[in-house]
Structure formats: C-alpha cells, structure tokens
Amino acid sequence: MKGLVKSLNNIKGTTRVCGLIGNPVGHSISPVIHNTLADLMGIDLVYTTFKVEDDQVEAAVKGAYALDILGMNVTVPHKQAVMRSLKEIDPLAEAIGAVNTLARVDGGYKGYNTDILGLARELEEENVCIKDNPVLIIGAGGAARAIAFLCASRGASSVTVINRTVEKAQNIAGAVNGYYGIDLVKAVSIDQALDLKGDGYVAIQTTSVGLYPDVDNVLIKDENFYRKVGAGVDIIYNPYTTRFMKILGEQGKPAYNGLKMLLYQGVAAFEIWNNCSVSKDMADRVYESMKEAMGINE
Ligand code: ATR
C-alpha cells in the first residue's frame, strides 16, 4: 500500500501514540488517515486501534492518560458514554451530545466532535453553502442531530428534519431550537416531506438506507421530491455513489458522498493533537491513500 510507508524502523522511543477506541475497530480507515498524515508531515506519531468493551470506557480513558497517549478518536458505540470520563468538553460537542476526538489536556482529555467539523469542511470544499439556504436533513439518528446543530450554527435559513419515526425528528428540533433559542428546525414525516414547498434545498442524507449491500435503496423514492433539491450530500461512502446521489445526478444536481467528511474529521483531529494545519494538498494525498486502502477506483 503506497500511502502507508511507516515501518517499524520509524517507531522510536520518542514516537507519540494516538488511537481509536470503539467496538468493532478492525475495519477502521482511521489508521490510514493518521499514519499517512504523520509520514507526509514528518510528525513522530503512530496511530492504532483499541477495541474497548462497553464497561471499560472509563478505564480505557484513564489508562490512555496514564500511558501518555496524545489523543484518541472514539467511534461507535462509545461516542456518548465517553463524555462521562472527560476533563472538558467543547461546547458544540456538548450540545450535540457526542464526542469523537479526545485531546490531552492537564489532568485528562478534552472532547470534541470533529465529525461535524469534517462535514463542514467537505461542504466548504464542494461549495455547498448552508448560510442563508434551506436545508433538509433526511434521518434523525446521532449524525442527523449533529448536522442539525451545524446547520443552525452556520446560519441556514430553515432546517427540516425528515424521518420515518417523526418523534425522533421532533426531539432534534426541540434540542437545537432550545439550545439556540430560535424556531429554525422543524420535523416532518416522509409523507409530509413530499408536499414541501420551495426549492433550492441542500439535502443531507444521514440514514443507513442505501448503505452496502442495500445499494439500490433510497429512503425517498419519489423523484419529484428531488426537484426541490439544489445540491445533496449522502454521508454514506460505501457505495461510493449511492442511489440518492444517482437520482440527483440524473436531474443534473451536484451530489457528494461522505468520504471527505471521514477524511476531514480525521484531519481536524490530527490538527488538534499536533497543533498544526494540514494543507489541501496533504489532505488530497491522504484522500487518495484512503481510496486505495478501500479499493475505490473512482
Ligand atoms: P446514526 O447514529 O449513524 O445517525 P442511527 O441512530 O441508527 O444512526 O439512525 C439511523 C437513521 O436511519 C434513523 O433516522 C432511522 O429512522 P428511524 O428513526 O425511523 O428508525 C433511519 N433508518 C434506518 N433504516 C431505515 C429504514 N429501513 N427505513 C426508514 N428509515 C430508516
């Protein structure tokens, strides 16, 4: 694998350790992101994965601190539970209610949500503008909740959360509106979404519908719905081009997958840990390494 040039000879007594805690972690692409970045930027760091059981999250965080581990990523199912074991939490991560990055501070770790920073950076790079635009969030799980906070913080003109279970969409609307003291986010059922007025929506697909191997599936099948959409992002990246993206593409609309969100959540964590700035050129090279590691040829 070209991107992964770290050999055991590169690991020295001074090498700092970072890693991912979650369960499972065996298929994670994060080691490719961070080890490639460390190599490209000449930073003396190695990144690996740590499988952590549900009842060991606190012990893992304490142990990591004791072992002088520089930083950690956190993945499913520990993104909420880990919050109880932190010294500090970034306000946006606190509001979202999920942490995926831990940075070492005096006496413990500070938690951040770089998933959302990753999506923000992808949107910026692809020129998908949230500010002053109406947004549709499809789904109402953890990712949708974080994205609703992002949209509110970036000045969307409206945010509509569409979900099969409308109560979950209402919970997100209540949380975001309550946090910002505004009446911006509303919740609708899938049927109601078909009757939405307006056009030029930015649509962000957050459900697992369409994820490999269910690649021909999409939550909203009615093509008329997509006529109201100006640009779309599917946070799924396997398949590389989802059914949701294909429908938008057939209507001549730009549509992006979630691979750059994954890239940039890693880049943002790497920048926090190392107090550095990763250039676009470096990020592009990491993106190529990720695609190579995942066997994507597009
Ligand atoms: P995450 O935390 O990754 O966002 P999640 O919390 O499991 O994931 O949320 C999954 C989302 O996909 C939910 O919005 C879920 O809808 P419900 O809240 O109604 O369960 C949606 N989803 C998953 N499978 C679905 C299906 N077959 N049909 C409709 N919605 C589905």
Image: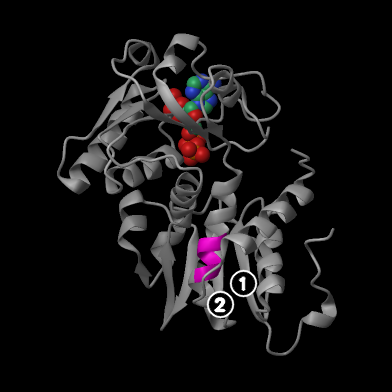
Q: Is residue 87 visible?
A: yes
Residue at 65%, 79% (x, y): give it: 43
Q: Position of residue 23 (x, y in %)?
A: 63, 52
**Does dot 1 land on a helix, a strand or a loop?**
strand
Residue at 64%, 76% (x, y): give it: 17
Indicate whether 73 appears above or below 255.
Answer: below
Whether 59 is among the magenta residues is no
Three-letter residue code for mark 2:
Leu
Q: Which residue is mark 1?
A: 18
Image quadrant where one finds the N terminus: bottom right
Residue 146 appears in which quarter of the rendering? Answer: top left
Three-letter residue code for mark 1:
Cys
- Asked whether the residues under the numbered discs 1 and 2 touch, taking CB atoms below 8 Å apart as contact, a structural biologist would say yes
Q: Which range is magenta? A: 267-271
Q: Is mark 2 within 8 Å of ligand 1?
A: no
Magenta region, main secondary structure:
helix
Image quadrant where one finds the C terminus: top right
Q: Position of residue 20 (x, y in %)?
A: 61, 62
Q: Earlier in the sequence, mark 1 or mark 2?
A: 1
**53 relative to 164 in the view: left or right:** right
Instruction: Give the camera-side residue of 47 and 156.
Output: 156
